[in-house]
Image (tube, rainbow, N blue to C red):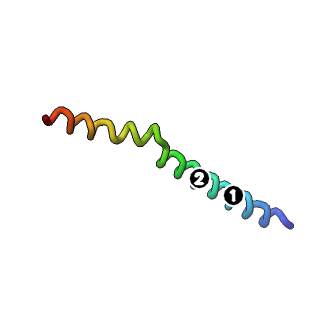
């Protein structure tokens, strides 16, 4: 395997890892609660 093949594999793996990190961040429970709390607070204050 030459240097171009290795670079192609490393680049592909880095994209897969980055995509996994983005998905994990987007679906994390901590972020979900941070986004949803204001909505529930607004609904509770409405009564």
Asked whether 19 or 39 is in front, the reply is 39
Q: CA distance from mark 1 to mark 2?
A: 11 Å
Residue named by callout 2 = 20
Question: Of the residues tagged 1 and 2, which is closer to the observer?
Answer: 2
Count of marks overlaid on the render: 2
Of the image marks 1 and 2, the number of the one nearer the N terminus? 1
Q: Residue furthest right?
A: 1
Q: Secondary structure at mark 2?
A: helix
Spot the residue most to the front: 47
Where is mark 1, residue-wise? 13
* Residue pictured at 52% horizontal, 52% vertical: 23
Q: Nearer the viewer, residue 38 or 7?
A: 38
Q: Residues within 10 Å of mark 1 (few under 14, many from 20)?
A: few
Left or right: 30 in relation to 35: right
15 vs 45, nearest the viewer: 45
Q: Residue at x 82, y 62 (%)?
A: 3
Q: Which of the image's four quarters has the N terminus?
A: bottom right
In which quadrant of the rendered view does residue 10 lie? bottom right
Q: Is residue 6 left or right of residue 12?
A: right
Q: For the C terminus, give its image quadrant.
A: top left
The picture quadrant where one finds residue 33 is: top left
Above or below, 1 relative to 22: below
Residue 20 shown left or right of residue 47 in the figure = right
> What x and y, as percent, mark residue 41?
25, 34
Q: Nearer the viewer, residue 26 or 40?
A: 40
Q: Position of residue 21 (x, y in %)?
A: 57, 48
Which structural element holds mark 1?
helix
**Residue at the spot x=27%, y=38% of the render?**
40
């Amino acid at each position: 395997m030459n240097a171009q093949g290795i670079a192609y594999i490393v680049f592909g793996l880095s994209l897969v890892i980055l995509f996994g990190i983005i998905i994990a961040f987007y679906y994390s429970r901590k972020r979900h609660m941070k986004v949803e709390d204001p909505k529930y607070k607004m609904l509770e204050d409405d009564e």
